[in-house]
Amino acid sequence: MNPISVSRDINFLRRQAKTVRIEILEMLTEAGSGHTGGSLSAADVVTALYFYKMRHNPKDPLWKERDRFILSKGHAAPLLYAALSLSGYFDKSLLGTLRKIGSPLQGHPCSKLLPGVEISTGSLGQGLSIANGIALGLRMDGLNSRVYCLLGDGEIQEGQIWEAAMSASHYSLDNLCAIIDNNGLQIDGCCHDVMTIEPIVNKWIAFGWNVIDINGHDIGAILDALDEAETIKGKPTVIVARTVKGKGVSFFEGKVQYHGVAPTHEELKKALRELEDNG
Amino acid sequence: MGEKEETRDKRQETSKDNAPSNPPLKIRGGRGSYDSSQLVATRDAYGEALLELGKKRNNVVVLDADLSASTKTGTFAKVFPERFYNMGISEQDLIGTASGLSLTGKLAFASTFAVFETGRAWEQIRQTVSYSNLNVKLVATHSGITVAEDGASHQAIEDIALMRVLPNMTVIVPADGIETKQVIETIADYNYPVYVRLGRVKVPVIMPEDYKFSIGKAYTFSLGKDANIIACGIMVSVAIKAMEILKENGIDAGVINMSTVKPLDNDAVIKAAKASRLIVTAEEHSIIGGLGGAVCEILTENYPVPVKRIGIKDTFGCSGPAEGLMKLYGLTADDIVRTVKEAIK
C-alpha cells in the first residue's frame, strides 16, 4: 500500500534533499516572494519523513492508514510542496504557480485546494493541537498510523503550543512525534534576542515528553531519531533538530533577512551552482 | 469557575422564579420532550441531546474546557468517558484538538462558555474550522447577559457577530429546549462548521411539539399588519409576550423565530417587511453585528423599511440577577412594546 520506496540509503536521501532544495529555490524565485530560510532549514527532516519514514500513498492521499504530516510552521509551504510533488501527489509543473491567482499552491498551505495537505496552516502555534486531535482519533480507531508535526522554533513562543504540549502528554500520545526546526532565527532576529526559547530540551522534558536532540542536517541522525521515536511508548516524542536557516546555500545560511524573502534570479543561479558543486 | 457555577445553579433551581414544581426532566430523544408548562435551559436540552446522539452514533466525540458541569457535556462524559476529552482550561487547544478529531472522521462537539469559545479561540476557529470547512460543532453555553452575576467578563454579547463574519460558518440560536434538541439532531447530519449559541437560564418552552427545525428556515408564529418582531434565542419568548400586550392595545404585531442567524432566511424577512412595513429585531446580543445587523443588511438591499433593533446598545453588561439585567438593558416585553408604539406613532 506504500508505493514510496522506504530506504535507509543515506546517499539517496541526500540527493532527494538536494532536489527538494533546488525546487524550493526555483519556485520561490518564480513566485517572487515567500519564505526561503525556514524552508531550506527543515529540508533534510522533511525529506527523511516523506522518503524514508512515513507510510503514505500519493495515488490515494486520503488512505486511511497513512501517517500524517502537519506543517505547523505553514510558511515553509514551498518545502511541503516540493516534497509532495517529488512524491508524486501532483505534477512538478504546478510548482511554478506558487502564490499566483488560481493556484492550489497558496502562500501558506490550503488543504481544500491541494491533495496531500492534511490541514490548512499558516497562523503559527496551532498545528500541534490539530496533530493531537488526529492522534487521538487514530488511536480510537485502533490504527497504527503515526502523526508528525513540524514546528518552528520561534513558533513555540505561541502559548497554544504549551497547551498542546500538556495535552499530548496528558493523553499519552505516543503515536505523535513533533519536530522542532531549531534554526535559531525568527523574523525580527535571533530567537534569544527576540524571546528566549532555551532551554528547549528541559522545557519539553518538564512537559512530560521524550526528547531527542539531534543535528537536523545529519540524515543518519534524523533517521535514527525517527526510528527511536516510534519505539517510545506512553509519551509523545519531540525531536529538537538543530538546524541552520537557509541551509545549503552559503549566502543564505544564518541570515535573518532571508526569512521571508525570495531569491532573485541572480541569487538563484549562484545558489543552484553551489548546490551542484557540493554534490 | 465550574464550582462557582454549580453553586449558583443550585440556587437557581430552588428559586421561585424558576418553576420549582417542575419534575426533573426525563431524558427522551427527538421532539416533544418538553411541554409548554415547563421552563428549560437550552444547555440542559443540549446535554440530553448529546447523550441521545452519542447512543445513536459511535463517532460522536465531545470536548470541553473544564466547564463540563456547566455546559452539560458532563452528561455525555459520564456515559461515554472514552469519547469525552477534557482539555483543561485551554480553549485554543480545545478547538485545534476538535479539528484534528474531525479530520479522522469523528463528529466533534466542542463546548465551553460562549465568551471563551468565540473570543479566546476565534482565530483557531477562523484558521482551522472555518477556512478548512471542517465538520466541527461549536456549541457554546452561557451566552448573553443572562450569565448574570458573573458580570461582563463572562457575558458574551458579541459572539453572534464574531461567528457570523466567518465564511463557511452557520450560526444558530435556538429559542427553547425543543428547538435545541432539534438543532443538535439536525446539525449532526450537516458536515460543516456550525456555531450553536445556548444559554444558562431556564426559559419557557414555546416551540410546538411537532416543530421540525431546518437550517436557514425561520419559524413564523404569526405575521402582523402593524409590526413584525424578528427574534432569536431567549428573546423569542419575550417577543411573544410583547405581541400579546400589543394585541391588547389594538396593535397587530407578529413574531418570527429567526433561529438561524446565518444563513438568514431572507424570504421570511422580506415577507415580514412587506406585511407590516415596520420590523423590530430582538436579541440578547449587541445591536451591532448580530441578528439586527443581519436583518438590516438584507432589508436595505431588497426591501427597505424602518427597522428598530432591540439588543445591548454597544456597552458591556454588569453583575446582577438575570431578570434585573434584562430590564436594565432594555430587553423586556415592555421595551419591545414601547419601541413598536413609538415607531408606528
Image (spheres, coloured by chain):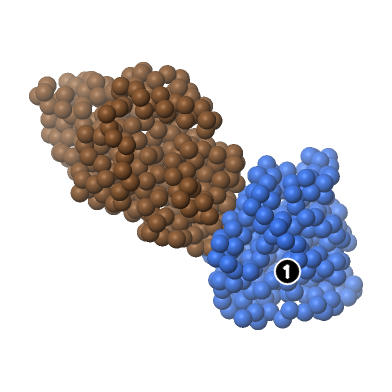
Chain colours: A blue, B brown
* Left or right placement of residue B79 versus residue A264 in this view: left
**SS type, badge 1:** helix
* Left or right placement of residue B189 versus residue B91 in this view: left
Mark 1: amino acid: Leu
Does residue A200 appear anywhere in the picture?
no
Q: Position of residue A53 (x, y in %)?
A: 73, 71
Where A166 sits versus B70, above or below? below
Q: Quadrant of the N terminus of chain A?
A: bottom right
Could you say which is closer to the camera, residue B3 or residue A58? B3
> For residue A183, what is the image quadrant?
bottom right
Residue at 59%, 58% in the rendered image:
A136
Where A79 sits versus B17, above or below? below
Q: Position of residue A12 (x, y in %)?
A: 81, 79
Could you say which is closer to the camera, residue B219 or residue B16? B16
Does residue B15 appear anywhere in the picture?
yes
> For residue B277, what is the image quadrant?
top left
Disc 1: which residue: A49
**Chain for numbered disc 1:** A
Residue at 39%, 20% in the rendered image:
B321
Q: Quadrant of the C terminus of chain A?
A: bottom right
